[in-house]
Image (tube, rainbow, N blue to C red):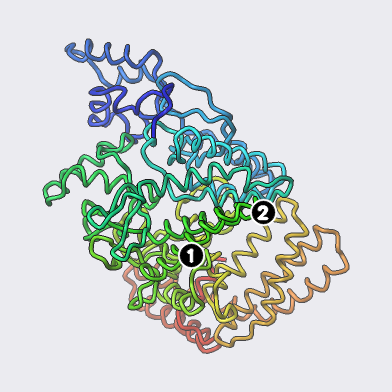
């Protein structure tokens, strides 16, 4: 990859010793601040001034930086929510607030100019991000007047592919060496499903091919003696799969001080500096930065060995890309190319079954090509094969059981089962209270962990064997879709909302599993109320009374349960208060009363855990 000659080097190369001095002196609490700053004169002049002034007795580095650089702002700090406006207007304001116009080239800036407007995640992330943008598009695509932003963002990624040969992590010069999970094919499919005015897939076929070639670069050079090169790995049976990889063996400019400390630990444990940085950069390309998923020792971040790992999610995404290429060539009548990519997709599908499915754990796992075995980490990346319909029904059932027994916690589905304190480990999950902001999350990505849980939700909906008996499907199906249906009402898609709720209503009535009666009652109560509201907004007043009446009936059945839960929580709150006051008698008294209500609920609904009570309180 040859960078555009008009672009400046990455800030660490551009400013040399000045960059290192600023970062190691912790001039800014966030090390990304300086690399996003814009010089007020040419970088070469600033470097020359620094060399002259730093030897002066009263030199102040902080003052020097503030004098010669325009620091980036934090847009979120200037935004104030208006409680008087509707949710629809609130979301639309946020879209506008996080939308950036087409860029212009600024001397010395690390921002790579893009030709079309785009949405940024917000906060310290002031640039477009590759895989974040797919989830942003899931929200934008629902609003016809926002379709042009989706197109513009896709065109920006196509522009990156044409300019650099691949899609960068984000439009910054310090991201010029690595990508992120390849969601470009999913973006094209999303737009093609929403816009039938032209052949979207064929329009972007050249860029789809280029991205695929970038990920598969050097695959024809692999041998038994050299089984690994760039992003490709040749396994002993000749199968070729992919890994995350970055050619640079230097610290990331946006995180230099943090990585310097870890590098020293790694070196102390016999890990070379070059290997440490390459593994570290590979993790960042994965988007899972950082997680026990990549560690040999889950308690030591410096034992990251990401380039040794063949990730299951990455290979599922590339399988999807191969399938899209096959179908697009078929549309064009290029049967030879279509057949080629069909075979490549089929080969990858078989490889995912052979190397990523673990018969012992009954789960899809990452594969360590250096040890020829699965990695020990069981993570939510293991549900990607369900989303892309690569799993058998039996495998899907086993994955579902893992999710239900291990991953499903009171806050949602956790990302991994390891408690390390890292961003992509326990307890990161999709919070139920965040669910009410679903539309906002898919628009501008407040929480990165939401991304994966949207995929989890879709996997369960697609592959669940017995949805009527599935607590996970209930939590991320009926309730989640109810929230989504309300979002459709907000953006005036009344007909779509009614279709959603009618289908959910039918499913709730047919769901008669006694073990889930509490869930069934609550589900039907929410859906009937939402359906009445949807008909009201659509002007179908003759149907409002019917569903309003159904809602009332369900509510009467449910009142006793609601009251029991509320009283239980009241007593348990008093337990905590009296416990803190060391009042043992009252603590015991209210704890016993709390247990009475819990036992009542367990007997009535055959509940196996207190999790079901938390559903009611969280909702």
Q: Secondary structure at mark 1?
A: helix
User: Which residue has dot 2 on it?
Assistant: 193
Front position in the image: 200 or 481? 200
Give the mark toward the camera: 2 or 1. 1
Label 1, residues with CA under 10 Å away: few <14, some 14-19, many ≥20: some
Residue 616 visible in image: no
Q: Position of residue 261 (x, y in %)?
A: 20, 42
Q: Position of residue 420 (x, y in %)?
A: 29, 59
Residue 156 sits in quarter:
top right
Q: How many marks?
A: 2
Q: Position of residue 586 (x, y in %)?
A: 39, 76
User: Which residue has dot 1 on it?
Assistant: 346
Image quadrant containing the C terminus: bottom right
Q: Is residue 467 above or below residue 193?
A: below
Q: Secondary structure at mark 2?
A: helix
Label 2, residues with CA under 10 Å away: few <14, some 14-19, many ≥20: few
Left-right relation of 303 to 444: left
Q: Residue at x 70, y 56 (%)?
A: 488
Left-right relation of 2 to 205: left
Left-right relation of 192 to 375: right
Residue 111 sits in quarter:
top left
């Amino acid at each position: 990859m040859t960078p555009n000659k008009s672009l400046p080097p990455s800030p660490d190369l551009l400013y040399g010793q000045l960059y290192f001095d600023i970062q190691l002196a912790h001039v800014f609490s966030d090390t990304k601040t300086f690399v996003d700053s814009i010089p007020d004169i040419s970088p070469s002049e600033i470097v020359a001034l620094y060399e002259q002034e730093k030897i002066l007795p009263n030199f102040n580095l902080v003052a020097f930086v503030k004098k010669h650089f325009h620091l980036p702002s934090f847009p979120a700090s200037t935004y104030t929510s208006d409680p008087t406006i509707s949710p629809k207007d609130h979301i639309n304001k946020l879209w506008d607030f996080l939308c950036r116009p087409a860029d212009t080239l600024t001397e010395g800036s690390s921002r790579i100019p893009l030709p079309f407007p785009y949405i940024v995640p917000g906060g310290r992330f002031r640039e477009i991000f590759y895989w974040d943008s797919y989830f942003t598009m899931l929200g934008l695509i629902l609003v016809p007047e926002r379709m042009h932003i989706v197109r513009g963002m896709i065109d920006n990624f196509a522009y990156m592919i044409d300019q650099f040969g691949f899609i960068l992590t984000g439009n910054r010069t310090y991201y010029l060496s690595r990508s992120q999970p390849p969601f470009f094919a999913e973006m094209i499919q999303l737009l093609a499903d929403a816009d039938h005015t032209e052949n979207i897939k064929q329009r972007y076929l050249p860029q789809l091919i280029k991205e695929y070639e970038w990920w598969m670069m050097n695959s024809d050079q692999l041998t038994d003696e050299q089984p690994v090169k760039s992003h490709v790995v040749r396994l002993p049976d000749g199968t070729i799969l992919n890994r995350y990889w970055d050619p640079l063996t230097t610290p990331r400019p946006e995180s230099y001080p943090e990585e310097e400390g870890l590098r020293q630990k790694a070196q102390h444990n016999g890990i070379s500096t070059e290997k440490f940085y390459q593994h570290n950069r590979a993790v960042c390309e994965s988007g899972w930065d950082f997680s026990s998923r990549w560690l040999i020792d889950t308690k030591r971040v410096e034992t990251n060995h990401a380039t040794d790992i063949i990730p299951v999610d990455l290979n599922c995404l590339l399988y999807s890309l191969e399938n899209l290429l096959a179908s697009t060539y078929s549309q064009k009548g290029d049967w030879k190319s279509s057949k080629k990519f069909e075979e490549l997709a089929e080969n990858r599908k078989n490889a995912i079954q052979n190397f990523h499915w673990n018969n012992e754990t009954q789960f899809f796992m990452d594969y360590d090509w250096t040890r020829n075995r699965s990695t020990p980490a069981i993570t939510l990346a293991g549900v990607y094969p369900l989303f892309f319909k690569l799993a058998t029904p039996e495998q899907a059932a086993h994955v579902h059981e893992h999710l239900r027994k291990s991953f499903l916690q009171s806050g949602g589905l956790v990302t991994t089962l390891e408690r390390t304190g890292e961003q992509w480990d326990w307890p990161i999950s999709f919070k139920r209270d965040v669910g009410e902001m679903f539309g906002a999350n898919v628009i501008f990505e407040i929480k990165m962990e939401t991304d994966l849980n949207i995929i989890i939700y879709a996997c369960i909906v697609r592959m669940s064997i017995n949805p009527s008996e599935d607590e996970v499907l209930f939590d991320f199906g009926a309730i989640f879709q109810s929230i989504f249906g309300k979002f459709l009402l907000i953006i005036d898609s009344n007909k779509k909302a009614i279709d959603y709720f009618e289908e959910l209503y039918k499913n709730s009535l047919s769901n008669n599993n006694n073990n889930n009666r509490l869930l069934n009652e609550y589900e039907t109560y929410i859906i009937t109320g939402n359906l009445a509201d949807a008909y009201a907004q659509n002007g179908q007043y003759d149907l409002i009374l019917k569903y309003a009446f159904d809602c009332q009936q369900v509510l009467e059945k449910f009142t006793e349960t609601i009251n029991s839960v509320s009283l239980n929580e009241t007593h348990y709150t008093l337990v905590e208060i009296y416990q803190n006051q060391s009042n043992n008698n009252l603590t015991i008294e209210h704890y016993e009363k709390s247990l009475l209500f819990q036992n009542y609920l367990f007997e009535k609904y055959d509940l196996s855990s207190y999790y079901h009570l938390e559903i009611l309180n969280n909702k």
